[in-house]
């Protein structure tokens, strides 16, 4: 008879392979043999959550077996919200933060829950926490980052001013002030804004520098900041920006990197009308939030939580199978390997979903221009698409590639676009700028995901 540790190990292996059904079967078998094992209990909760099954009470049991682990309570709160029990999730986090005011991940989780519920004062938990722990500079900066991510510039500036008034200026607060000055537009025209921190080496600061230099016409400086990250894992965040710099400078490497629309492909998957209707119905039930997360590209719509394509749902499983076939075809037809290229350097063997979700856009909704620096190949599968008369004049609702973020004010046009059609899957490099044009009326529902090479491919 297989013992609990062996079943736990099997569950971990199946989960790593994204075989949710196999992982769930193995971990439930382990739980029968070792009901008091903390690691097994956590595994049951995690796999159940990813499978789309009720998991909040399972996380509660795991937390009871590991009472010092606040991360399990955070996962429990997230599961409560996902199951329509948001008030319970908020109450749990508030209770824990009352005795752990410096628990930054707890604050971030609570802020996200309140923001996606449409609450304006989503970051209020920090106020009471700092009153109890006023000397905690890191806690104050975490508050700043939550507000800055939401582009609440005035509130973020006030937090930094309060932190410096209480504890003095520090490098973190100085960098925060520079970031706000650049991104809010207040100091966007100052070419020397970042000159005083040239000695500071930080990836986040370098991204802020690059954006500031591009916005201010210092294209050479932007390119040079990107270049110093060549050959490092951080370069994935800089490829989109060096593409813009190369295009502005007339450097042929822009074509080598992006290839205009060369690496963008569309696949019209073999969904029947009924399959698409069933998929749309399934996805609508999963859109329980009122607003998107602040760090997402969604504007005027919502995005689902949990890894969508790992759910144990026959309708979603059908979509996943069709998607995987198209991804395989995309990978198999990529140009020859190029060890220096972010798309063409990777292994062409097995692949995994690095994330998967659905987006539901309301009238006038769109995706802000963005990239997916943690992915290799990114996507958009159109499930529910508006009738042409509701979209508005072309290119309303279209997925465009290559246009820079509008806030940078760069004179670059899109490379091209994909026209949304029910069942159409667009696949493209994760480092490529993309966004959608707002549409007039109705609903647009998509599935999106990132692909990464399997680490053992």
Image (cartoon, grey):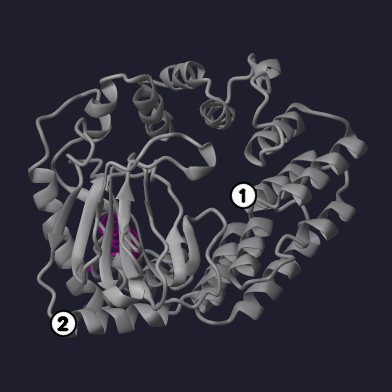
What predominant SS class does the magenta segment belong to? helix
Q: Secondary structure at mark 2?
A: helix
**Which residue is painted at 10% across and 34% down in the image?**
335
Question: Mark 2 against mark 1, which lies toward the viewer?
Answer: 2
Does residue 137 appear to the left or right of 346 in the view shown? Answer: right
**Residue that carries the numbered disc 1 in the rendered image:** 149
Residue that sits furthest to the right in the current view:
166
411 versus 195 height, above or below: below
Residue nearest the viewer, comparing 406 with 320: 406
Quadrant that contains the C terminus: top left
| Whole-percent x, y for residue 118 in the image | 63, 71
Rendering quarter of residue 343: top left
- The tag on residue 273 is 2
Tell me residue 377's x, y (percent): 26, 46
Q: Is residue 398 left or right of residue 115?
A: left
User: With respect to residue 56, does 22 lie above or below?
Assistant: above
């Amino acid at each position: 008879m297989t013992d609990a540790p062996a079943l736990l190990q099997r569950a971990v292996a199946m989960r790593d392979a994204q075989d949710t059904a196999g992982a769930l079967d193995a971990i439930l078998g382990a739980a029968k043999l070792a009901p008091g094992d903390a690691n097994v209990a956590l595994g049951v909760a995690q796999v159940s959550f990813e499978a789309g099954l009720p998991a909040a009470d399972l996380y509660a049991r795991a937390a009871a077996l590991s009472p010092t682990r606040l991360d399990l309570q955070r996962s429990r709160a997230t599961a409560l919200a996902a199951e329509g029990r948001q008030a319970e999730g908020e109450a749990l986090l508030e209770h824990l933060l009352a005795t752990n005011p410096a628990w930054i991940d707890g604050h971030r989780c609570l802020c996200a829950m309140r923001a996606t519920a449409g609450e304006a004062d989503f970051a209020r938990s920090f106020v009471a926490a700092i009153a109890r722990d006023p000397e905690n500079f890191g806690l104050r900066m975490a508050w700043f980052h939550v507000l800055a991510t939401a582009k609440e510039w005035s509130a973020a500036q006030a937090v930094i001013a309060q932190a410096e008034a209480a504890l003095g200026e520090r490098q973190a607060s100085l960098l925060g002030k520079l970031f706000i000055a650049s991104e809010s537009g207040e100091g966007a025209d100052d070419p020397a804004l970042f000159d005083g921190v040239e000695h500071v080496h930080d990836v986040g600061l370098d991204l802020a520098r690059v954006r500031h230099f591009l916005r201010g016409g210092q294209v050479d400086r932007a390119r040079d900041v990107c270049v110093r990250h060549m050959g490092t894992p951080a370069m994935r965040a800089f490829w989109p920006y060096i593409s813009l710099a190369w295009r502005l400078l007339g450097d042929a490497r822009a074509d080598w990197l992006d290839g205009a629309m060369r690496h963008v492909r569309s696949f019209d998957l073999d969904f029947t009308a009924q399959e698409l209707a069933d998929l749309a119905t399934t996805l609508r039930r999963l859109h329980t939030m009122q607003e998107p997360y602040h760090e997402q590209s969604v504007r005027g719509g919502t995005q689902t939580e949990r890894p969508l394509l790992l759910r144990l749902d026959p309708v979603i499983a059908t979509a996943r199978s069709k998607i995987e076939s198209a991804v395989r075809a995309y990978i198999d037809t990529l140009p020859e390997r190029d060890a220096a290229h972010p798309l063409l350097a990777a292994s062409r063997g097995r692949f995994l979903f690095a994330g998967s979700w659905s987006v539901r856009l309301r009238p006038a909704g769109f995706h802000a221009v963005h990239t997916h620096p943690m992915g290799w190949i990114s996507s958009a599968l159109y499930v529910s698409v508006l009738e042409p008369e509701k979209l508005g004049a072309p290119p309303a609702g279209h997925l465009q590639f290559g246009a820079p973020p509008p806030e940078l004010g760069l004179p670059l046009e899109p490379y091209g676009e994909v026209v949304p059609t029910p069942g159409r899957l667009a696949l493209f490099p994760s480092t490529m700028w993309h966004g959608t044009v707002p549409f007039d009326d109705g609903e647009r529902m998509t599935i999106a995901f990132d692909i990464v090479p399997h680490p053992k491919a």
